[in-house]
Image (spheres, grey):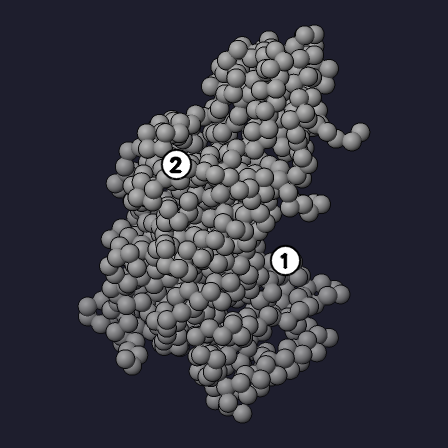
Amino acid sequence: MLRQIDPDVVAAFPITPSTEVPQYFSQFVANGQVRTEFVAVESEHSAMSACIGAEAAGARTMTATSSQGLALMWEMLYIAASMRLPIVMTTVNRALSAPINIHNDHSDAMGARDSGWVQIYNENNQEAYDSLIMAIRVAEHADVQLPVMICYDGFITSHSVENIMLLEDDLVKSFVGEYKPQYSLLDKEHPVSMGMFDLPAFYFEHKRQQAEAIKNAKQVLIDVQNEFAKISGRQYGLFEEYKLDDADIAIVIANSTAGTAKDTVDMLREQGVKAGLLKIRLFRPFPADEIVKALSHVKAVAVMDKAEGFSAAGGPIFVDVRSAMYGKADGIKVINYIYGLGGRDVGVYDVKRVYDHLQTIADSGQIDNLYNYLGIRE
Amino acid sequence: MSEIKKIEEVNEDISWRDITPGGIAPWAGGAEAFTTGDWRTMRPVLIEDKCTGCLLCWPTCPDTSIMPTDDGKIKYDYDHCKGCGICVETDRS
Amino acid sequence: MPYNFKKTAQKPERFTGGHRMCAGCGAPVVVRTVLRALKTEDHAVVANATGCLEVSSSIYPYSAWKDSYIHSAFENAAATVSGAEAAYVSLKKQGKIPYDAKFIAFGGDGGTYDIGFQSLSGAMERGHDMVYVCYDNEAYMNTGIQRSSSTPKFADTTTSPAGSVIPGKLQYKKDLTKIMAAHGIPYVGQSAPMKNFRDLYEKSEKAIYTQGPAFLNVLAPCPRGWRYDTAIMMELIEIAVDTCVWPLYEVVNGEYHLSYKPKNKRPVEDWLKPQGRFKHMFIPQNRHLIDEFQAYVDKEWDNLLKLCGEK
């Protein structure tokens, strides 16, 4: 997909499990299949710094990372967003150290959720492919001008062999279009200064404007997804509802485990249980009102977090969903499950335990445990 | 977002809607509009008769405040000169 | 073309007044000279590490830079400008940039010798066509004169204070110029703005117009941190060079060349005496500190002469 987008610059550093992204891509560069300048930097901090320099110089710029790599970029993530540079990055989700662990959870991307990047979570390779193409359009849109992070699960998604529908090269090329930045360091006729020192007289206004930009990303994503549906036949929403219409109990979940959970829903439906699912897609900006509306008719909801936020008050998705529902859907019982940390496998029957728990809560109208850990050895 | 044309439009009345995105300043060298001359406690004065036009003082100025003139001498930009005295000392030696 | 001082005065200034560096600061003098070495018609992209120069020259909306300028963080000016250079290579190849652009990064010694060292080393190794200029004022001046690995031994800084037991910084200054030369890049220069500015101008010109990565280490006095009277900056720089505390030399494709050999090598006291940061070295019982400083400078100078084939 990177080859089809054919960005001007890619700057990246190897880290499991995102390594294959720059690795395969550098072969395209070596074979002359892309026009991209590939910058093989000496760290992820420099990867994001070089992306910032390249994007500021008017180049369409992309990168990829995971886990510690994202952690090392942290400082520059905020700067990329605040400088309003539409870099697009695939974040192949992996657990954060310590202890060091190369397997999947969402602690890396969840820690970056307040960095000002648009974040889109993806269940499988097809969705990740489609999202990455759309991400270019969202990031570079005049109303947004922000970096976009396309998140999908390490190994489970990144190293799985799946059949996916690819678009023709020309179609991708015309969909993403030419990049025409408003300002560029390389514009000799209009030299600019970027990354300036803001005093209290202006910093707040810049932040308020940035907040508006990420707010705008929601509508822009809707529009881009509608346009994408016309060329691909695949229609995406801000999130996906699976058998949620008439559900009594539901879970909210992101990335690949949503696929597993859909099987659980099917199994429960066969047993006559009105189970449903809401799969998070756009997480930043958070489509709060739309999510509340979609859940407004259920009796009990479990929000599933594949990251322990260490707030002692629930994981990151839970905190946002519950906060969104406050005052708008107060009758609904909402609980939190932390699951799958460090690549702990979660199967159909593990998810069923969550629905069983929800059923008990729905029947009794009482929450016994607000914060829960799925499959932990007590 | 409306486009700002002049640096003067960026002042403490500007709305977040109008400010340049990401703190970009599309005014190269716009600092010339900011005066630092009032920092000065000592004022360099050119003694026209004694200036040989060697220009050795010109590049030593941290504030780009010594300008070569058409008659081969120099003049001071008192809007920006901070009075550090480097040029005076250079001249003396 | 031979250096013509008065002709360089006719080139347009690329760094304006109205910045907010302290009165008498050496950094803008370095910047003005480096940028003057650009061909007038060439576009420059300047990256700047966080530091005195950055916070003072780019206070929104007032930029002292007439070329394109970018600051992103402290430790990554080299990586940032390397990205801009990669963009240029890509867009030029695609026929989208019809003119020549040059890429210059400026960082203080903190952003270069210390926190920015990794990204500098990486960018130089990758071979980008860029120049990294360190304006070396031998401490973290922006945060209030803390020691860096560039601070000379015995200097009194706020994190290496001279006390009744410890006489200032205990470690020698890191020899960054030689470390950069060891990268095997095509051009490395050590310079200072002095006299008719020929040395710095010519080295800047070579650094900018040598294909591939180049590094310049330029002494930039800081009157606040070094505690000397602002007016004597140019004299102080000459003393640094004449005492061989700061020798002028270049390394071209791995070959060392001495740029200037003082006729009379002055004693290090001449360098130490005017600066408050070395004041404690002059109390009688600390004479051995001056002797050690002298011995170190002599040894380093001797090594340099050998490297340059002068001995």
Q: Which mark is residue A134?
A: 2
- Using the image, determine if residue A103 lies above or below residue A331: below
Helix or strand or loop: what does disc 1 sit on?
A: loop
**Residue C269 coordinates in the image, percent (x, y):** 59, 78
The reply, left or right, for residue A47 in relation to residue A172 is right
Crowding near the residue tagged with mark 1, few <14, some 14–19, many ≥20 C-alpha atoms within 10 Å: some
Among the 4 quarters of the image, the one containing residue B89: bottom left
- Using the image, determine if residue C31 lies above or below residue A323: below
**Residue C47 coordinates in the image, percent (x, y):** 41, 57
The reply, left or right, for residue C62 in relation to residue A15 is left
Helix or strand or loop: what does disc 2 sit on?
A: helix
**Residue C237 coordinates in the image, percent (x, y):** 47, 73
Q: Residue at x 54, y 51 (%)?
A: A19
Q: Residue at x 48, y 80 (%)?
A: C254
Among the 4 quarters of the image, the one containing residue A358: top right
Q: Is residue A141 visible?
A: yes
Q: Is residue B36 visible?
A: no
Among the 4 quarters of the image, the one containing residue C206: bottom left
Can you say which quadrant of the picture contains the C terminus of chain C? bottom right
Q: Residue at x 57, y 24 (%)?
A: A262
Q: Are marks 1 and 2 in contact (CB under 8 Å)?
A: no
Q: Which mark is residue C158?
A: 1
Q: Residue flagged by tag 1: what amino acid is it?
A: Thr
Which of the two discs, 1 and 2, sits closer to the camera? 2
